[in-house]
Amino acid sequence: MVIKKVGVIGCGLMGHGIVQVAAGGGSTVVALESEQRFLDAGLARIDKSLSKLAEKEVEKGKQTAENAKAWVAAVRGRISGTLDRKALADCDLVVEAIVEDLPTKLSLFKELGSICKPSTILASNTSSFPIAEMAEASGRPERVVGLHFFNPVQLMKLVEVVRTPKTSDEVFAAARAFGESCGKTPVACKDTPGFVVNRLLVPYMAQALSMLERGDASKEDIDAAMQLGCGYPMGPITLTDYVGLDTTLSIIQGWVKRFPSEPAFAVPRILEQKVKEGKLGRKSGEGFYKWEGDKKA
Ligand code: CAA
Ligand code: NAD
């Protein structure tokens, strides 16, 4: 099965990146948002990112300025935006990247099951929820997979391709090939909490926040320790800001509810407090650090 037309639902931190890499891989992409202002913001981020990537190619001497400009125009030309879910009806693949809230995702999958043509593959970019539950909600569980991209999508090389016991071989292979067409290396994962990366990464981030809460070290020192001591590109507190405090909290809260006896899953109070204060990280301009656009202030 060849994927030519892709729908991406949610054009936020992750969705805008998925739209961009899918179009970069040659697909025609429809980006769907809930409000025009969010759609405009997502498309503006794509424009900025494409310009930056083109600029770097020229700087490195990999492309002429003229070719880079033509590449940006071609990728951008494959992207359109909409607020109308019916525009997804004829997509070969729809990737959901909306808020990390299970009831909202379940109702979306139910609706997609009735809107999309029978052959459409439905995928979720969820960080933590069971793909199987969304698959059942859609009414076409054999055509549902997880396609878990990483932040920032334009730069991170991995995509986790998650299959449930009901995902068909054909759908899994098509999803994997789509990930490759986006320039990513796919890894196959079972439908377990957090798949591979987040099962390891999120408890580590939560431990770092608990360390901060206890006053064991300052946020700057925790970050410096993991960058310089382990060679991580970002420390865990900066990474929490980067991922979004609301998303990180939803992931951990969901796991605590489902797996109350698993000691690796615990909600740091400091995280709950910041979210209550509306400090969501890079996307709101402040989390544990202050941010100016995409950079730490
Ligand atoms: N598009 C185009 N260019 C971009 C970009 C984007 N989206 N994001 C950053 N860049 C550019 C920057 O503008 C910058 O360009 P200049 O050098 O010209 O200034 C360049 O890339 C490098 O970026 P930064 O200066 O911001 O800094 P960096 O060298 O630290 O690289 C990084 C950034 C690649 C994000 C790196 O810090 C990194 O790998 N961090 C870890 C990210 C990570 O762990 N992600 C996974 C999060 S968990 C997840 O995603 C799963 C989940 O479900 C929660
Ligand atoms: P975000 O808050 O930046 O973006 C979500 C977007 O979805 C918003 O722009 C919102 O307007 C839109 N939206 C919400 N409900 C919608 C609906 N019903 N229809 C259309 N649009 C809707 O969140 P994000 O960080 O991009 O996360 C999106 C998904 O990706 C979540 O499931 C999250 O767990 C997952 N994810 C996040 C990261 C990360 O680092 N932030 C990494 C990998 C996966």
Image (spheres, rainbow, N blue to C red):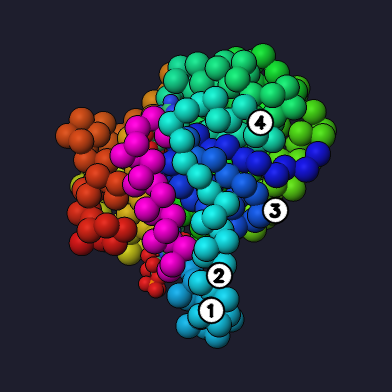
Distance from the alpha carbon under mark 1 to that under mark 3: 27 Å
Instruction: Tell me the crowding category of disc 1: few under 14, some 14 to 19, or many 20 or more residues within 10 angstroms, Cα based.
Output: few
Q: Which mark is first along the chain, 4 or 1?
A: 1
At which x and y percent is residue 186?
68, 50
Q: Amino acid at mark 4?
A: Asp
Dot 1 or dot 3, earlier in sequence: 1
Residue located beneath label 3 in the image? 180
Query: Which residue position holds label 1?
Result: 66
- Segment colored magenta: 33-52
What residue is shown with label 2? 70
Measured as percent of width and height from the top left, residue 199 is found at 53, 39
**Mark 1–mark 2 distance (CA, rounded to whole Å):** 6 Å
Task: Please name the residue that numbered disc 4 is placed on.
Answer: 90
Q: Main secondary structure of the magenta part?
A: helix
> In the image, is residue 101 above or below residue 22?
above
Q: Earlier in the sequence, mark 3 or mark 2?
A: 2
In the displayed orientation, state which residue is furthest to the left. Answer: 277
Residues at marks 1 and 4 touching, judged by CB atoms closer than 8 Å: no
SS assignment at label 2: helix
Return the x and y of residue 25 as percentages of the image width and height: 65, 56
Q: Nearer the viewer, residue 33 or 186?
A: 33
Label 4 beta carbon less than 8 Å to ligand 2: no
Q: Which residue is rendered at x = 24% and y = 44% of the image?
A: 284
Q: Give the answer, above or below, for where 184 lies relative to 143.
A: below
Residue contact at pointers 1 and 2, CB within 8 angstroms: yes
Alpha-carbon distance for marks 1 and 4? Answer: 34 Å
Query: Label 3 is placed on what type of residue?
Result: Glu
Distance CA(mark 3)–CA(mark 4)? 22 Å
The mark closer to the camera, 3 or 4, is: 4
- Quarter of the image for the N terminus: give it: top right
Pick whichever, 249 or 72, lies toward us.
72
